[in-house]
Amino acid sequence: MNTNSIKAIAASLLILCVSSLWADAKVKSEDSSDQEAAESKSSDKKGWLTASFETNTILYHQDKKTSATVPDSKFGSNNYLKLDYYNNRFSAGIQLEAYSPVLVGYPSELEKAALTNYYVAWTDDSFSVTAGTFYEQFGSGLLFRSWEDRALGLNNAVMGARVTYNFKDIIAVKALWGLPRFGMKFSDTQVRGADASVSISNAAGWQNVYWDVQGSVISRYEALDADSEIDGCKPNTTGWSARMNLETSGFYFKGEYVDAGLKYYYNSAYDGEGDMYHKKRGNAQLVETGYNNGGLGVGLTLRRMEWMDSKIINGNSSTSNMLNYVPALCTQYTYMLTTLHPYASRTGEISESFVNSGELGGQIDVFYNFRRGTVLGGKRGMKLHANFSTYYAIDKPGTFRAGNLLFRDFSIDWEKQWTKKFKSILLYSLQDYNPSYGARNETWTSHIVVADLLYKYTSKFSTRLELQYLHTKSDKKDWVAALLEINFAPSWSLYVSDMFNYGSSMVNYYNGGVAYTKSRTRVGLSYGRYKAGYICSGGVCRQIPAYTGVNLTVTTSF
């Protein structure tokens, strides 16, 4: 273990100790006398400080059976410390991040330690202004979104200024300017944008109908090199979106059209003649409609998009290099075998042998809650949920013609509370996955069955058992998996799991761990073998290599 690794652990433990002392002091203050509480309330006028700390540290080791990735340091540690101060309408905050070094599979531009985010803001009932770093989203995020997701190693906060104004909940506007963050620094790319919404229902005084229209515009500027300028590329790209939302009596409808502006893709076949870059105009159409009432929920989502990969820096392939949010609109699973081949949205790509302008498809989601006392609901009720999603490559750019199948999933899950102590969830999923991302007309078909069984012995002691099976004639053939979780509320929990590929590699991906929670602090320690594949959060995925090691996680707030 190198010096940086020791320093990272020492810093993590120091911050954890300080946070624990702070939390203990706060608990004691909450148990003080009424007079002390009154004094504390009076002191709140001077403002208050909140903080959170998170560390994810892994010690790696060699594993010949999985060809596990082991960094030179045999160690990785991602650490985040966030402080926020509030005083009436004023707020300010900072975030410190340290990667000593970064965990394997995370973007390589995350390195060392730095003060990455800092802001000051003023907010009243109708007006706000922020200077420094901030997060923002226009509409569904197809046009523009800045956000943080530590599971993905993504933080594209904008460093600049933002102003918002709301007039009687009828007209709301916001404007921003800044430099998006890339890795540990802020890029030279500039974004300028505005968003506005008008509530027609509030203006008309309607009580049972909500109807508003919205619009956004975003401008992205990145200085170009001489070759790009000669080839006709422009440093500035402007996109816009128009949206409508309607809700009444359990029914809802949302529509969005996006023109993302021109995109530039390098021509790998360029030989000195013709264009060095392919110029494509990004666009997307999104429709969401459904009904929710009386225990029934039905939702239909349709989306078509092409050339929608909005980048902070052109030509950079990092998973953190994005300025918009294009999630996979399908069931987001958490069970091990259902996530072996998760779907990632296709936003358009050009290679020497393959051109795919994007995707089109959608999903229908149906949920019904059989209430207690009904024939099917029985004494404690029952929940039934089904989802069907399918997506295709666009056969010809600029059309709605479907090409090769990219992904299809049909799932149904049944949740039943049998007694006060026993609850079960049964799930079946039929997945078709295209391993060539639409380049060829081929799919891998998988049948997946999951049983999730929870039993509460007492109010403080419970167990949860997962049993999973995957059958396929493709890829690495059949899998089985199991997980046993034991909980001693409110503090302790432990688990053991195994995922076994008996159809091909005959490798066990075992894992086990224990976690302790007290107040706002959680400490987890685990050891296991992890399969190469994808990790997804909110419908966005990043690829991870195989690794084996000991994992320490700590989260706390105070």
Image (cartoon, helix red, strand yellow):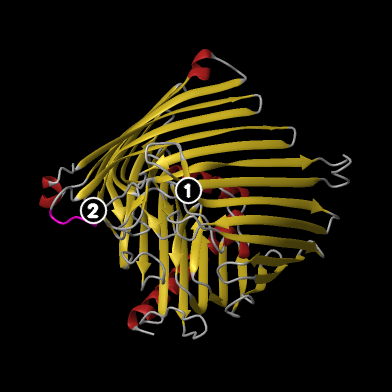
Residue 144 to residue 65: above or below:
above
Based on the picture, tell me whether residue 454 belongs to the magenta stretch. no
Residue 535 to residue 362: above or below:
below
Q: Nearer the viewer, residue 97 or 271?
A: 271
Mark 1 belongs to which amino acid?
A: Pro
Residue displayed at 51% across by 27% down: 245
Residue 484 to residue 293: above or below:
below
Q: Nearer the viewer, residue 448 or 403?
A: 403
Residue displayed at 62% across by 65% down: 337
Instruction: Name the residue beneath numbered marker 2.
Output: 267
Q: Seen in the image, is 395 located left or right of residue 515?
A: left
Instruction: Name the residue beneath numbered marker 1.
Output: 327
Residue 436 visible: yes
Q: Residue furthest front?
A: 441
Percent position (x, y) of residue 302? 53, 37
Q: Which residues are magenta?
A: 267-272
Percent position (x, y) of residue 75? 41, 79
Mark 2 belongs to which amino acid?
A: Asn
Percent position (x, y) of residue 90? 38, 40
Residue 329 visible: no
